[in-house]
Image (spheres, helix red, strand yellow):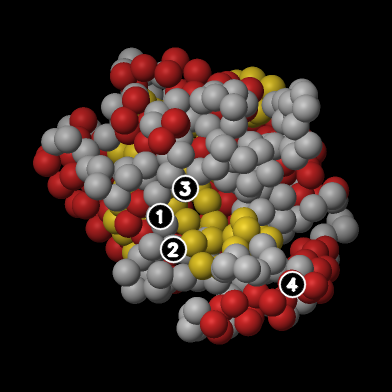
Amino acid sequence: MTTFSVANSTPLQVDIWQSSDDSSTHSTDMSIAPDVKEQLIELIQFLQIPYETLVPDLQKAIDENMKQNGVENNDGVFRLDRYHPLDEIQDWLLSIAYEYPEITEIIEVGKSFEGRPILVAKISGRSSDEERPAVFLDAGIHSNEWVAPATLIFFINELLTKYEYSGHITYLLNHVDFYILPVFNVDGYVHTWTKDRMWRKSLSRRANVTCQGVDLNRNWPYMWDELRGASADPCSHAYAGPHSESEPEVKAVSSFLESLGANLKAYIAYHSYSQFWMTPFAFSRNARPQHFERIAIHMHTSRRVTEAISGTHGEQYRYGPVADLYGEATGSSIDFANGALGVTYAFGVELRDNGMFGHLLPPSLILPTAEENLAGLLELATIVLEEKGVSRAADTRRLLESNRN
């Protein structure tokens, strides 16, 4: 929770959903309890800040979203156009790996605070490449951002089912190892299904601390102690934890990323919402990669990727540094990947939408969101291989020949 107040007034607690420092918006989305609504509106009007009510009744909107998600979803089939609880997701991961054993491996990289497994799907084709670049994707580090795990589930399905049928996907899988973590914050994600749909943090507890959980995207060991866009207050939604990597989820994933070594060429963290494709850095608006060449690579890659995204369904994703678009945030995964591990192609993505539905994106928009971002992912992976000098033509010829036979 965040507290707002003016002199001689009672502090008002609100829940910040999203805050953008993008020059075209400078907007903040927040939810408030009914008993402070009038006071907050008075404060906003006093400060002459324009405002708009997007969701008059949050609980009603949550109930409607869940109702939409349950329509025609009682046949036991794992549908890609629906949101799923953690047990269904992890069961599906194991089943699809069983169905495609030659190109899929499920890796448990660690366990959460409450002991749940953190599962990564490794997908790679049958190429004999010894040194294959690795592309790592994660989603659900903030547990209320349901469309992000749903998007990565779609990625997994498309890569597996289109291998040896799609020329582009076959080319990529023959030369790239994809590591996909669909649900990072497994404890928090379960909590959003069973207790609090808007829960964002982990579920860790500490002695003599009333409030529960840490913002896992403020807990990474890079510029953690700067505390910009993060908080030392355990009750804050942006609580950074008592120290960096205090959370077992972050420690497990950071260790796995480090284990990939020099093969790790790209890292993408998927969030929602705002439709941003974000480059390093998050920890400061004044920070930029030290080498001009890396900045040029970020901008060139971002332009190509966002063009691929918008070319799918026409949705526009703006690109630029995290701190410029979203605002400063220390201890983030993207800064760790780029700043600590030296991964050039490190990006963060804010998926649909621009705030009309926010974290309650209707299930009907899962597939369009996932499809456009798959186009972006494939473009990024292509750029990684172009840097390596791998030609797509030979793979395409082999695919055509095998299909003819």
Element at badge 1? loop
Element at badge 4? helix
How packed mark 3 is, by other alpha carbons closer than 10 Å (few <14, some 14-19, many 20 or more), is: some
Residue 4: x, y in percent? 60, 63
Which of 391 and 2 lies nearest the eye of the viewer?
2
Is there a contact, CB below 8 Å, between mark 1 and mark 3?
A: yes
Q: Residue at x 46, y 70 (%)?
A: 27
Q: Which residue is mark 3?
A: 229
Q: In this rendering, would 132 be left or right of 159? A: left
How packed mark 1 is, by other alpha carbons closer than 10 Å (few <14, some 14-19, many 20 or more), is: many
What amino acid is found at the position of numbered circle 3 in the picture? Gly
- Quarter of the image containing the N terminus? bottom right
Location of residue 394 (image quadrant): top left
Q: In this rendering, would 103 be left or right of 383? A: right
Which mark is first along the chain, 3 or 1? 3
Residue 10: x, y in percent? 69, 66
Q: In this rendering, would 139 be left or right of 34? A: left
What amino acid is found at the position of numbered circle 2 in the picture? Ser
Task: Mark yes or no: residue 123 visible.
Answer: no
What amino acid is found at the position of numbered circle 4 in the picture? Val
Q: Which mark is residue 327?
A: 1
Q: Which residue is mark 4?
A: 36
Is there a contact, CB below 8 Å, between mark 1 and mark 2?
A: yes
Q: In whole angstroms, how far apart are the C-alphas of marks 3 and 2?
A: 12 Å
Element at badge 3? loop
Which of 214 and 180 lies nearest the eye of the viewer?
214
Q: Residue at x 51, y 67 (%)?
A: 28
Q: Residue at x 77, y 24 (%)?
A: 207
How packed mark 4 is, by other alpha carbons closer than 10 Å (few <14, some 14-19, many 20 or more), is: few
Which mark is first along the chain, 2 or 1? 2
Q: Which residue is mark 2?
A: 20
